Image: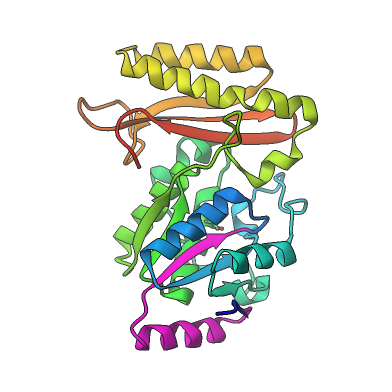
Amino acid sequence: MTMLRASRIVDVREIVRGWHRAGATVAFVPTMGNLHDGHYALVEHARRIATRVVASVFVNPTQFGPSEDFARYPRTLDADAAGLAGRGCDLLFAPPVEEMYPRGLDGLVQVRVPGLEDILCGAFRPGHFAGVATVVARLLGIVQPDRAVFGAKDWQQLQVVRRVVDELALPVVIDAGATVREPDGLAMSSRNQYLEPAERRTAARLYAVLSAVRDALRGGADPHAAEAHALSELRAAGFRPDYVAVRLAHDLAAPLVAGAPRIVLAAAWLGRTRLIDNLLIDGEI
Ligand code: PAF
């Protein structure tokens, strides 16, 4: 089937309603476009768990801070559409801003996630997770999928989305897709293309440092000592780290509880580019 495209909510609803009536199951992959193999792995994951796949491309203004990269965020819709069609996506929803925020941004009804939205990346990007939670709730309401797939690379986002779905009782199952890495270990991200060649060579150290924390914790190391060591390693490599944190994987709480799966997460700047990554210490996603 050739991929359908829609930019209006009514059209998405009609298409998905038709599929559901015909007995199909629908999996949804929300994105901000500029798609890479990490996104395409989510689309392939979606293909495996449902009979129809919807992807969205929307660079959501409300999740960018005033000094962040909204204006320069890469927009490559034609290439994204070709890539999605090639991976068996059935419908691409690429709305204009007015379709997503018809009343504008002042007075917008917002979804907040107290606790989760203010820690880790949220402490450095005020308002970011409220923007994510709000747009994801709206996208889920528009598409009404049976399942939705989010990348594990954005682990805090994944937990924010799970909380929203749980607390608002949204009838959708959230799936996590494994992080896809470059051969040197760097997690794929649209922001990697901002890196200068020398920064790109350094960038893989983030994965190496997180791997060392994971291995140390598996060997019984103290989490605070491992975090402090990782911060100094990142600084020595040329990063400006925002944080390195060992937390409980499912709710990002600290302190750790014996026996509960742990995760190490980090955010660090290289020049003008902010990179994030994480590794589970126990278990699998
Ligand atoms: O992960 C992203 O690309 C975005 O945060 C998302 C989930 C599409 C919401 O805008």
The quarter of the rendered structure image containing the N terminus is bottom right
Above or below: residue 85 compared with residue 248: below
Residue 110: % across, % down:
48, 62
Is residue 102 visible to us here?
A: no
Classify residue 49 by image quadrant. Answer: bottom left
Residue at 57% of width from left, 25% of height from top? 206
Ligand 1's quadrant:
bottom right
Above or below: residue 159 compared with residue 106: above
Residue 149: % across, % down:
44, 58
The quarter of the rendered structure image containing the C terminus is top left
Classify residue 61 by image quadrant. Answer: bottom right
Left or right of 213 on screen, residue 208: right
Left or right of 36 on screen, residue 20: left
Residue at 61% of width from left, 28% of height from top? 184
Give the magenta-colored segment's residue range. 6-32
Residue 38: % across, % down:
56, 48
Residue 52: % across, % down:
44, 74
